[in-house]
Amino acid sequence: MTVRADLNISLDGFASTTDQTPENPMGEDWFRLVEAYAATRTMRRRVFGDESGAGTTGVDEKYAAAYFTGVGAEIMGAGMFGLHAHPDDPDWRGWWGEEPPFHVPVFVLTHRPRPDLEMRGGTTFHFVDLSPKDALARAQEAAGDADVRIGGGVRTVRAFLAEGLVDQLHVGIAPILLGRGLRLWDDLRGLESDYAVRSETAESGTIHVTFRRR
Amino acid sequence: MTVRADLNISLDGFASTTDQTPENPMGEDWFRLVEAYAATRTMRRRVFGDESGAGTTGVDEKYAAAYFTGVGAEIMGAGMFGLHAHPDDPDWRGWWGEEPPFHVPVFVLTHRPRPDLEMRGGTTFHFVDLSPKDALARAQEAAGDADVRIGGGVRTVRAFLAEGLVDQLHVGIAPILLGRGLRLWDDLRGLESDYAVRSETAESGTIHVTFRRR
């Protein structure tokens, strides 16, 4: 029943990037942010379909495995589904492929709802025009006893954090300076006062920081 | 002969703070930034004159002890000496007390030089109107075979970083979000490409990140 969020950010706090192109919708900077995570055994298998068992197995892997454990529903912003890049295409099915890595109901926040989209592997996208609080209530209903993950992007996570709706925030901080993009931490002064904060460093150099509600 | 810099910043990257008052020249936020460092045995002795041996002795202490080891000269911005708060007072002797914790020549960068100021314990303040590069040459001459520390504030450290003059940067990241102040990382995109970056977490929750020139 925990509400969780999980983001990769740079040492200078940028979580989402601004160098996207049609050919590279996530941007080069984004790739560098998630590089260590993408190298883990769990992410290689779950996101990239690599069933060989290859991938890192250290501290990053511990967080990657936890990422997929116990989640019963996901909430994401319209941008993370790709709606901003395809606003007028009613046939757009997101850029997560025909079998997205979620395997749970996913609530996509948008002011322009569209019909549900049922994908392979248990992922159904629901497009909802709701406040963070109301979207969370819908997702919690769908998740039952399992956790709800606020998947991203950064604006969405920040909105849920600002309203005090997140129980556990994990950030993987890549030891790089991007100098551009969207900052996770803007307007969150004093957030730590409601949380216990723990940090751990991975072999890759990634700094894992976890905020858990006291 | 290493050029070192050392700063305490918040998780959201703020190194210097903006809530200063005449009664509290460093500001409340600044105290929270340095709290774990100030609790170490070395800082209690060297900065606060506590000879009892009290203080923490863990990972933070390791960095605090290193802070004072091998430094032959220091460079600081005018603000760190307090010139901005006392621009027209020729008798102002800085807010570091009569026996400042440096014990080496200190070069204070200012466009309004004043006579040298010799304090107790080996600290002499030299007020110089020089570029970062030229100030560094002066400090290196004074330091001989020892290191030069770029002591702060954040604008000064950033200027030396931007010109590629720093061999080793250590930041102690307090797990707090200040949401205001001066950011260390602005305009330093890609800095890591010239450095090896290592991170370590202290018992206090402080994340120590060290950039060492490759």
Image (spheres, coloured by chain):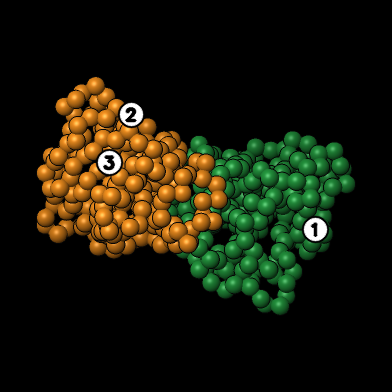
Chain colours: A green, B orange
User: Marks 1 and 2: same chain?
Assistant: no
**Residue A28, image x, y percentages:** 68, 52
Q: How far across and how far down the image is residue A99, in percent?
A: 79, 61
Chain hosting mark 3: B
Identify the residue position indicated by label 2 in the image: B111
Residue type at the position of mark 1: Gly
| Residue at the extreme bottom | A52
Quarter of the image holding residue B51? bottom left
* Circles 3 and 1 on the same chain: no
As drawn, B110 above or below A22: above
Q: Are marks 1 and 2 in contact (CB under 8 Å)?
A: no
- Rendered position, B154 above or below B72: above
Q: Determine whether the residue tagged by mark 1 lies in a helix, strand or loop.
A: loop
On the image, numbered disc 1 is attached to which residue? A97
Q: Please, which chain is the residue tagged with disc 2 on?
A: B
At x 62% / y 61%, what residue is drawn? A35
What residue lies at 45% left-to-right and 59% top-to-bottom? B213
Dot 1 alpha-carbon crowd within 10 angstroms: few under 14, some 14 to 19, many 20 or more: few
Circle 3 is placed at which residue position? B107
Asked which secondary structure carries label 2, the reply is loop
Alpha-carbon span between mark 3 and mark 1: 59 Å
Quarter of the figure that contains the N terminus of chain A: bottom right
